[in-house]
Amino acid sequence: MKKNILYVLLIFISIACDLTKEDKKNTVRGDIVSIPITEMETDYGKLSDFAEDIKMIPLEFSGDCILDKVEKIVMSDSCIFIMERYNQKGIYVFDHSGKYLYRVGNCGQGPDEFVDLSDFSLNEEQQLIYLYDIMRKKVLIFSFEGDFIKDIQMNYYADKFEYQDNLFYLYRESPVMGDPAYSLVIKDDKGKTINKYYPLINKSPYIHDCIFRKLDNEILFAEYMRDSVFSVRSGELTPKYFIDYKDKSMSKIDR
């Protein structure tokens, strides 16, 4: 993947990754790196603080592709894949110059269609794209060219979703329905549960989502408004970063 281009601002996790390399004030507790938030400015700062290189790619719009609020962008070695938040017609595919190519998936009731698209993920090695249909609780698998291959039943209402190394990572803050009733569930490519974390409990009303940050050999996972970032690898969740707010009062947007 093109790691030298900043195309999604996951500031919380980006700061955690950068500081472990440069900020000597960080402390290590076993295998967990503690990042003192009081040593940092609480605004977003400049893009140059978070990226080695910045490239602007103007996207081509047409009658088949008019984007409003972008929900997710993933860049592969060959294409840019974009999910629009409200116009759920599928995943829009552009080349690296911004030229619109085609759309993957369709909204509908057919076996190769989704009812409600909640998230998507890429399998670079096999050139596959996974679409998650939250209403029918299943993964739809397409080739990068948009050809439907098959679906996998997951039996879980996932708001957020990621794939890596033959495992699917499913997240829903309040899993009132689905099997199992845990917030973070890990399943294999047959839909079998491999691991599960965070049983259904009464959580803070300020947590409504999570971040999956996919790297080469692991996934970084963080719930919004929490102070820990976890490494997820081979179905196991391990604490990696601890954000130490100390006595500093911070607004929700700064967190």
Image (cartoon, grey):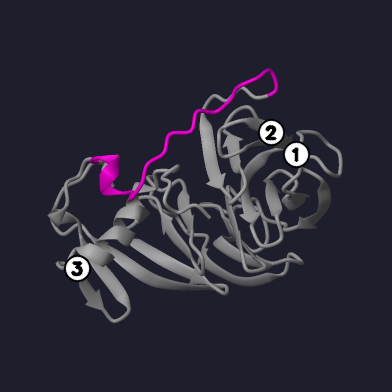
Residue at (43%, 34%) from the top-left corner? 56
Q: Residue 252 lies in what quarter of the image?
A: top left
Does 180 sit left or right of 74 as displayed?
Answer: right
Residue 98 position by quadrant = top right
For the residues carrying marks 2 and 1, which lies nearer the camera in this image?
A: 2
Q: Residue at x 71, y 61 (%)?
A: 126
- Whether 59 is among the magenta residues is yes
Q: In the image, what residue occupies the spot 29% across and 54% down?
A: 15
* Dominant secondary-structure state across the stretch colored magenta: loop
The picture places residue 117, in percent across and down from the top left corner, at: 67, 40
**Residue contact at pointers 2 and 3, CB within 8 angstroms:** no
Gap in angstroms between the C-alphas marked 2 and 1: 13 Å
Residues in magenta?
45-64
User: For the residue marked with disc 2, what is the amino acid?
Assistant: Leu
Mark 2 crowdedness (10 Å alpha carbons): few <14, some 14-19, many ≥20:
some
- Give neighbour class at mark 1: few <14, some 14-19, many 20+ (Cα, 10 Å): many
Q: Which residue is mark 1?
A: 105
Residue 61 shown in magenta: yes
Look at label 1 and name its amino acid: Gly
Seen in the picture, residue 202 relative to 180 is either above or below; the reply is above
Image mark for residue 26: 3
Q: Are marks 3 and 1 in contact (CB under 8 Å)?
A: no
Q: Which residue is mark 2?
A: 101
Disc on res. 186: none
* Image position, residue 77 (x, y; %): 58, 51
